[in-house]
Amino acid sequence: MVSLASKAVRVGLLGLLAGLLLATMLATQALAGDKDKIVDGDESHVAIKGYDTIAYFTEQRAVKGKEEFEFSWEGVRWLFSSAADRDLFAADPERFSPQYGGHCALGMAAGKVGPINPELWKIVDGKLYFASSKAASDRFAANEAEIIKKANQQWQSARGQN
């Protein structure tokens, strides 16, 4: 015969396990929902390691942004080198944000995400792409069209848009 206390302990344990399972499921869904956001930020949720995304387009170089010219978009902080750059981004963030959530284009083509080097970048057909290393940058430059095609497919698949 099972005592009432023993039943209470079992019910409590089942409740605890159910709660842990639910928490795990919710955390997994939250991560899945962030796949299309800029996730290559640092611990402070700063995109592109603090570089000014507009400068890649207007100055054709990597320029560090300043906290005084910050704009929040897609759950991350974007830093700019000037108020003009910040305002240009704020008017059309989709146009100026990097491809693949700010991840390496070559890595994305292989279905992987990881950090980038903001000094290794390229604009192709008006879109900003990053690389994680000099080797990745060289491989991207050697076969841009094919890598972009594969990376686009992987990005869409990761976001559940197949």
Image (cartoon, rainbow, N blue to C red):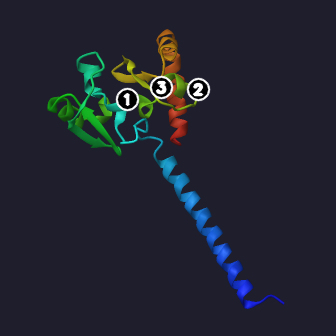
| Residue, disc 3 | 104
Question: What SS does tag 3 mark?
Answer: loop
Q: Quadrant of residue 122?
A: top left
Position above or below: 100 against 28:
above
Q: Of discs 2 and 3, which sits in the foreground?
A: 3
Residue 21 percent location from the top left of the image: 62, 63
- The residues bearing labels 2 and 3 have C-alpha atoms spaced at a distance of 10 Å
Nearest the eye: 111 or 70: 70
Residue type at mark 2 is: Ala
> Which residue was labeled with disc 1?
98
Report whether residue 162 is seen: no
Residue visible at 28% across and 43% down?
72
Disc 1 element: loop
Which residue shows up at 52% across the image and 28% down it? 108
On screen, residue 6 versus residue 70, left or right, reads right
159 vs 44, left or right, is: right
Separation of residues labelled 2 and 1 (CA atoms): 18 Å
* Residue indicated by mark 2: 110
Q: Which mark is residue 75?
A: none
> Going 55% across and 37% down the picture, which residue do you hit?
157
Which quadrant of the figure contains the N terminus?
bottom right
Q: Which mark sits nearer the N-terminus, 3 or 1?
A: 1
- Front in this rendered view, residue 1 or 52: 1
The answer to whether residue 50 of the structure is visible from this angle is yes
